[in-house]
Amino acid sequence: MNILFLPILSVLLFWCAACAALPFLVLRDRRLARIRKRSLFDKSADQVSALCAIVMLLFAAALGADAFWHGRMDVVASSLSRPVWLLFVGGECLAAVLALCSRALAGRRALALAATLLSGLAAALSYLLFLVLLWSLLRGEQIPGFADMAFGADARSRLTALGGQFAGWVNQFSARADWALSAPAWGFFCFLAPAAAQLCALLWHVARRGADDFGRDYYTFAVGGRARRAAWSGALLLPFAALLLWVTPPFAAQRAAFLPFGNMGPELLIPLYNVLPLGLPLAVLCCYLPGRSTAPLRRKSLIVLAPIMFFAGLFAMLTRLWG
């Protein structure tokens, strides 16, 4: 592990979480547009749908290239469990294809909504597989794989054996030593998906202000509402983050060589990594203030600062779980 591995892992976690929830934001806006008879929600859904297709396509391309050319993540993830890694990559590629299909079928509303729903389900299942790989990497837990199976077995027997291994792995969950830690961690990761998606959508609304000139009223409505939802989604993370900080020991400098700023002295490094989790509540505050403003676009600096603070807090949480 090098000093950039945990930051890159934080980026992948945020990216994967956003991909898992963005299709459901599109479905929500489409439903509100139909119920409330307001085109503002359809405009918001069109923008988020474009963001969803771009983000998923880039993520699937990056994962596919890494798996095909045996890159850094492929080597690490395959050492944990090759079947889970391949299912994760395949699920993200399927979600990206379905997201593109939903854009292509924009003229047929029912088919587009069905493709968006299927894309969200595929991305959500892939996110679950990614969490399994992430938890195994952070906690050093072995995942079932093909390593212990007899060479030359047919595909059916290998899949049956793999299913039996996973059933036993799940049944032993309550007997693990870190079950009290994993419960709030899984709650944190579950609420991470809507918070990451809302943050990405908020930034996308601001970025598209010059290209999609829908008028001042639309962006006041879209940016303000999205900022409020991002703040509430992030606020749901804070109790789980606080619980994780309480059950994990304070940061120690034994593994500082594998982390950024590891060349700093312990008197500076330890306070730095113990303060970094404050990035999560600060990110919530950066989203809350524009949401309460009558002119949210005048607070672009806070909107741009929110994902930076959120990433710092997420990286600190992964560091505490790894330590």
Image (cartoon, rainbow, N blue to C red):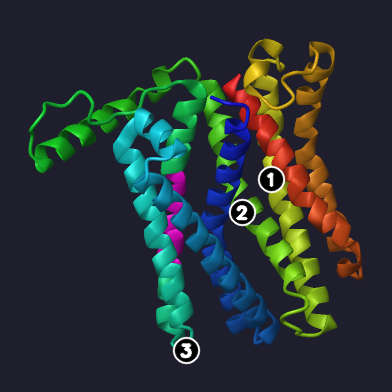
Residues at badges 2 and 1 in contact (C-beta under 8 Å)?
yes
Name the residue rendered at 78%, 38% in the picture. 279
Magenta stretch mostly in which secondary structure?
A: helix
Label 3, label 1: how many angstroms apart (C-alpha)?
A: 36 Å
Residues at badges 3 and 1 in contact (C-beta under 8 Å)?
no
Name the residue rendered at 48%, 38% in the picture. 131
Query: Does residue 311 sit above or below 176 in this rendering?
Result: below
Residues at badges 2 and 3 in contact (C-beta under 8 Å)?
no
Whether residue 238 is visible, yes or no, is no
Q: Earlier in the sequence, mark 3 or mark 1?
A: 3
**Could you say whether the residue bearing mark 3 is in a helix, strand or loop?**
loop
**Could you say whether the residue bearing mark 2 is in a helix, strand or loop?**
helix
Label 2, label 3: how many angstroms apart (C-alpha)?
A: 27 Å
Q: Earlier in the sequence, mark 2 or mark 3?
A: 3
Q: Which mark is residue 107?
A: 3
* Residue type marked 2: Pro
Q: Which residues are magenta?
A: 117-128
